[in-house]
Amino acid sequence: MRTSLVTDEATVSWLDRSGGSRSAQVREDLAVLAALRRTWRRRLEITDPEMDLLRDLLNGSVMPVEMASRINTLLAMEIEDGEPDGLAEKWGVDIHGLAEKIRAAHPADAWAVWDEIREWWRQEGQ
């Protein structure tokens, strides 16, 4: 399948970093992201009730890509801010323990959490 990509100079420079073809670099980068997405939950040991809390909490949230390097900290703060809303009791989750799991996560894993929740809501909204 062929597709095209419109992007900026910084992204083109990033794609040219290996000296190979841009399409090969895009395929490799996407494969890495997909692998991270498939395995983050096992690494973070997120339970089903914790995911339910996260889905509830993050419904309608927006996370700009520029925040990717700090997303673990931002998500942890969102989780802690959800405490007064009673989400811990609703889902039977240790909200501080969940916030610490996310805060300690690598940003790539935290982004995968966010991306899965975002996808879940896109499908749920259909």
Image (cartoon, rainbow, N blue to C red):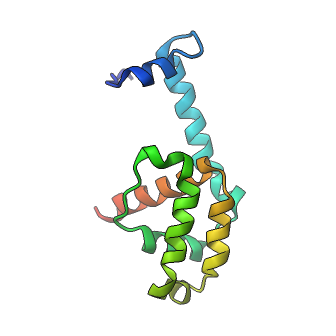
**Is residue 60 placed above or below 8 in the rendered structure?**
below
Question: Which residue lies at the image location 48% right of the left edge and 88% below the top edge?
Answer: 86
**Is residue 32 placed above or below 22 in the rendered structure?**
below
Question: Which residue lies at the image location 60% right of the left edge and 15% below the top edge?
Answer: 18
Question: Which residue lies at the image location 44% right of the left edge and 86% below the top edge?
Answer: 85
Q: Is residue 112 among what the camera can see? A: no
**Is residue 25 placed above or below 50 in the rendered structure?**
above
Q: Quadrant of the N terminus?
A: top left
**Is residue 88 placed above or below 42 in the rendered structure?**
below
Q: Is residue 77 left or right of residue 65?
A: right
Give the x, y percent position of residue 124: 35, 65
Question: Which residue lies at the image location 59% right of the left edge and 86% below the top edge?
Answer: 92
Q: Quadrant of the C terminus?
A: bottom left
Give the x, y percent position of residue 109: 61, 51
Viewer-nearest residue: 77 or 7: 77
Give the x, y percent position of residue 48: 59, 72
